[in-house]
Image: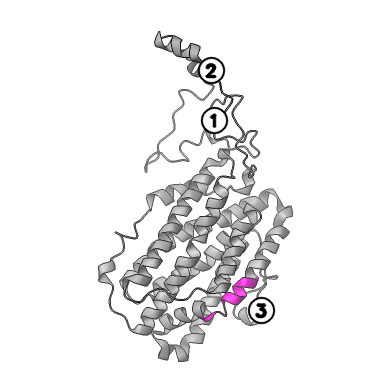
Amino acid sequence: MTNTAINFEYIERAKRGEFDLGWLKDNKSEWGTKPTISKIGLTLRDISYGSYGDVPDNPKLRTMAPRGSDIDPDVPDMGYTVNTKMEVWSDNLLDLYEEAVSRQWSATRDIPWNQLPELPSDIEHSICQLATLLSEVEMVAADFPAKWLWRINHDFVEAKMFLCTQVMDEARHTEVFRKRALANGGGLGKAKAVVEQFLKLILDAQSYDEGSALMHLLGEGIVLSIFRAGEFLSPSDVEKRIFRLCMQDEARHVAYGTMHLKYRLERDPSIAEDFHAYLDKGEELMTVLFTTPEVIEPMAILAAGGIKQAEEVGVFAADILRQRIVEEYLARCDKAGLPRRKRINLPAEMLTGIATDD
């Protein structure tokens, strides 16, 4: 129970039509100022003006009162633990949110499931194993932001709103890949301990910094590379559609993570070594992933067009995919201002064909 007293005297006055109207008289907001509406509609950036758009670096309160509103002096403390803007912010947040809400799609209606062709058993097994892996890893990208959302100060509401879209995106990704595994008579494949260990590493992160680096920069970056490869290697237009739609979502999440890290490091370069340490741990598990048959072989078989063909070109195809994943990951680190080419924690055998000079 709260200590807020019921004002019975006010109830009686209100019955007589004697309103208080203090909320009207004391309003200190930018009354009369109107936003300029964009061609696409009223966006978050359009309403980001005055006190409404002034996001404090270190909010004085830990409350859910809307930023820019006139706040009661005795509002309760919500106990937020992420109370520094640079812990969650990025310069592309507002635009990414608008893109996210405008590009939502349905795994039920927007995939032509009735057009799935019958596939050779080795191709179907490969697609189902890949779908199993993706339905497994995608949900961590919903669980992680959900774990931190209630800890983030409400003055950073745009960051919270974007993370909410990510939770929805990832739930849909898990849905669509689970459906693909079951839709054509194949079924779910094998879940590996090393994959679960990587997911646990993200969920067990002791700070938002650590989890975001492992998930947005590394984990989701790997998945984005797999989506791109999957769209190219898909055995039918149905899978191409799935990978293409998932790719547009995943690109937003990776863009946020990259620019969030850039924003963070520009304001506090001293924490760069902390992020290097986070990624050192993640790359150790990346090494194991690159040598896990259930992760590598389905992609090699799809690239080759079957098991027999994969015996000849499968290793080559797997090497190309690995090089693409690592190179795109290192490029993200470069863009974020955290160069890792000289200190990447992968065996030399896995760095063939990859530039390791900053």
Q: Residue furthest front?
A: 1
List x then y, in percent, for residue 245.
38, 62
Mark 3 → mark 1, Cα distance in angstroms: 52 Å
Q: Quadrant of the C terminus?
A: bottom right
User: Does 104 sit left or right of 206 as displayed?
Assistant: left
Asked if marks 3 and 2 touch (Cβ < 8 Å), the reply is no
The verdict on residue 305 being magenta is no
Q: How many marks?
A: 3
Q: Residue at position x 45%, y 79% from top?
A: 298
User: Does 237 sit left or right of 75 as displayed?
Assistant: left
Q: Amino acid at mark 2?
A: Asp
- Viewer can see residue 218: no
Measured along the vertical axis of the image, is residue 296 above or below residue 338? below
Q: Amino acid at mark 3?
A: Pro
Q: Residue at position x 31%, y 64% from top?
A: 111
Q: Quadrant of the N terminus?
A: top right
**Magenta segment boundaries in residue numbering:** 284-293
Q: Residue at position x 56%, y 39% from top?
A: 154
Tell me the residue that label 1 is attached to: 68
Tell me the residue that label 2 is attached to: 26
- Dominant SS in magenta: helix
Tell me the residue that label 3 is attached to: 347
Measured along the vertical axis of the image, is residue 35 above or below residue 237? above
**Colour scheme used in the picture?**
one colour
**Does dot 2 land on a helix, a strand or a loop?**
loop
Label 2 crowd (10 A; few <14 / some 14-19 / many >=20): few
Label 3 crowd (10 A; few <14 / some 14-19 / many >=20): few
List x then y, in percent, for residue 213.
61, 59
Front-most of residues 186 and 323? 186
Q: Amino acid at mark 1?
A: Gly
